[in-house]
Image (spheres, helix red, strand yellow):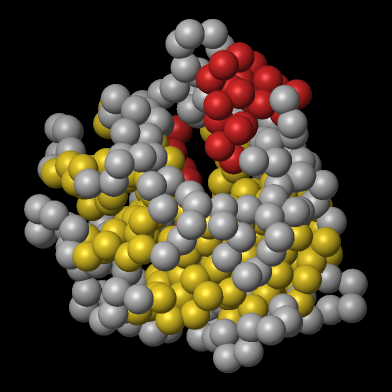
Amino acid sequence: RVRTVRFLFGTASAAKAARAGGGGRDERDARRRGTDAAGARPPRLRRRVLSVPAGPTGLRRLAALRHRGFDWNDGLFDVTWSENNEHVLVTCSGDGSLQLWDTARATGPLQVFKEHTQEVYSVDWSQTRGEQLVVSGSWDQTVKLWDPTVGKSLCTFRGHESVIYSTIWSPHIPGCFASSSGDQTLRIWDVKTTGVRIVVPAHQAEILSCDWCKYNENLVVTGAVDCSLRGWDLRNVQQPVFELLGHTYAIRRVKFSPFHASVLASCSYDFTVRFWNFSKPDPLLETVEHHTEFTCGLDLSLQSPTQVADCAWDETIKIYDPVCLTMLA
């Protein structure tokens, strides 16, 4: 059974215009074409952050909470929860800023961090509870490290030669994070140094997403505009340890399962979500096609081994239990 939540964050007409202009194969072009298609004004956005508790209780309360939120004056591209406070989260936006929110307070942001000079497309809170560290990736080609209790960034990481689409902390190694970029590389960084540790020329196309395996500290997956997913063993990055093919347009988000070491999910501008087991000879487990526009967001529940949420330009969030994960449970 699929639960559908209506959530307006961009116009369907803009999505159609972007697809007609080239299939959304380039993230920046897709956004620009969507804006141009709407005329002088950008696509209509509801810049709204929803407060939804984790687990089944949160799902039951989602309908009641959908009208509770906070407005911001530009498009919000990513959100990450604090690992130390269930009410605190950080968002990032098209005006180059990060916003710190407290969902228990019906006011504006607690703090706004404005240092990036272009859109901030990715933000992630460290999973090490002893740290208060947030990492952000921007179209200004930089990654910045933040402590939300400090009013400015702690340091800036440079090296990418194009826009940065994804930044994500390692769940295993404190102070270590990965980033992926339009320069076709995956990069591994350590906060103890401002230089890059590993540079992986992972694709011959823009890389829109990356994720760490929850069971292997050396395994990272990338998803790119070339429609492929590739797994990388950071001890030897000469060749990918796996490649998954099947999507027909750019892969927008990829996530490893928190319950199964070799299972992952991906969503794409081909409107589909696909589930994979890279250890199998036939790795594609299931294809879900329940959106009518670009599928752009995806996550697997940390509480339920079968539950998935995804979202798309068709203004909906789908919450469901795919058959393949139900069979694995």
Whole-percent x, y for residue 16 in the image: 70, 22
Whole-percent x, y for residue 146 in the image: 22, 61
Whole-percent x, y for residue 216 in the image: 56, 86
Vertical placement of 43 versus 162: above or below?
A: above
Q: Is residue 94 visible?
A: yes
Q: Residue at x 61, y 14 (%)?
A: 37
Task: Using residue 46 as the reference point, say whether residue 132 is left or right of it.
Answer: left
From this viewpoint, which residue is outermost toward the top?
39
Give the position of the N terminus as an image quadrant: top right
The image shows a total of numbered marks equal to 0
Q: Quadrant of residue 98?
A: top left
Vertical placement of 279 versus 18: above or below?
A: below
Q: Residue at x 10, y 53 (%)?
A: 151
Q: Residue at x 68, y 36 (%)?
A: 24
Vertical placement of 14 versus 234: above or below?
A: above
Q: Quadrant of residue 31?
A: top right
Give the position of the C terminus as an image quadrant: bottom right
Whole-percent x, y for residue 39 in the image: 54, 8
Q: Is residue 3 visible?
A: no
Q: Nearer the viewer, residue 323 or 70?
A: 70
Q: Residue at x 53, y 75 (%)?
A: 199
From this viewpoint, which residue is outermost toward the right?
282
Q: Nearer the viewer, residue 82 or 181?
A: 181
Q: Nearer the viewer, residue 112 or 53?
A: 112
Q: Quadrant of residue 51?
A: top left
Task: Using residue 57 as the reference point, say whether residue 194 is left or right of it.
Answer: left
Vertical placement of 329 versus 311: above or below?
A: below
